[in-house]
Amino acid sequence: MLHTGDWHLGDRHGLSPETARALVKEARELSPDLILVAGDIWHLPSPGNRYLRAAQVLLGALAEVAPVVAVSGNHDTPRSLVITHPMQVLSPIWERQGLPLHAVWEGCREVRVLSRSGKTVQVVAVSHSALPEGGEERDLPVSPDPEADLSVLLVHGAVEHPAAPLCYLTGQPGEKIVPRSWWRDRGWGYVALGHYHRPTKVPAGGTRAYYPGSPAPVTWGDWDPETPHGYLWVETGKGVSLRSLPSQPMESLEVGSVEEGLSVLSSFPEGGRLRLTLPLSQRTGSGTLLYAAQRRGVDLSLVYLGEEEEERPLWEEVESIAGGDLLLGWREYARTHGLEDAVISLGEELLSRAEDEGGGENRC
């Protein structure tokens, strides 16, 4: 089996085309009986057409190698009934193509796969939305089948056990804990987990439970650039091994002005990743740099050095980031400061503008 996940397509640090091509190439060379994708394929539940297409192609290419079972994660699961899960959007396409691709975005589904050697593999795939909330008690509706040659549990979430008091919680939005009774000492031959971005063997007695980690440098403090990242190769009777994939490195440069930054961008390779450090006094010109990077297809991060300015209203800081560009400023502030503060700031400013125009709250 090939066990992967946490691609976070759509995030600026998500799975790169280079890494995706390497994953497909190695899958073709290894020719597994089964491919497991453990959630967070996308970074957002509404990833946009570009990243819908990227996932369609990538998962389709893997399904041409071997049957694929994929589950949803906390990042790509909608928390609103008006949003359709991206897996639900793509499933009819895969069905028309006749691909053995089993995408589970709601509930719990049992999938049976016959290996090339004639062995029966039972995969119980649990969507992220099927995990219990908070202290809610809920039983796993499907158990390991003693008649199967191998039973696999595939789920995206943090796990509880005595040796990990933090339960592999990362502080990500919407994360949930997989109940211990679902996976430990239950009779699973393999527990394929997703959510924690470092490749990890969970210390769980006789239960083989693993996180493959993320092949992309998306981090909540759980991605170590010094540690190899890629996917897990699982061989019955032989064990589990981590196989690394190439990741796109980020180049860091320090410049003295926005103009110098634009000069660097003009010759920077398209599709590359760049972190620019500027004096704090140059912060008002960051929108120009972000726009130039977007046009060139460069993944740009900005860092500012210098004394902090005197405290000012949150919205002024947001607006100054992009020289008055509302949308670009909000996006950059949300990326660097936290979504909740940015949403509150945006709402307050829109309310104020609507009231200034005489429309009051109804206009907002």
Image (spheres, helix red, strand yellow):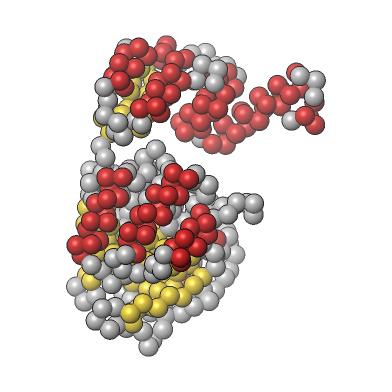
Task: Name the quadrant of the N terminus.
Answer: bottom left
Q: Which residue lies at the image location 29% right of the left edge and 83% below the top edge?
A: 119
Image position, residue 65 (x, y; %): 29, 65
In this view, the residue in front, 300 or 100, is 100
In the image, residue 264 above or below residue 116: above
Position of residue 281 measured from the top left corner of the image (x, y, whole percent): 42, 11
Report whether residue 239 is seen: yes
- Name the residue at 57% across, 36% down: 340
**Residue 275 percent across, percent down from the top left:** 32, 27
Q: Is residue 360 left or right of residue 188?
A: right
Q: Quadrant of the C terminus?
A: top right
Q: Is residue 97 above or below residue 226?
A: below
Q: Quadrant of the rendered structure where residue 354 is?
A: top right
The residue lying furthest to the bottom in this view is 147
List x then y, in percent, for residue 146: 38, 86
Residue depicted at 34% across the width and 30% down the height:
298
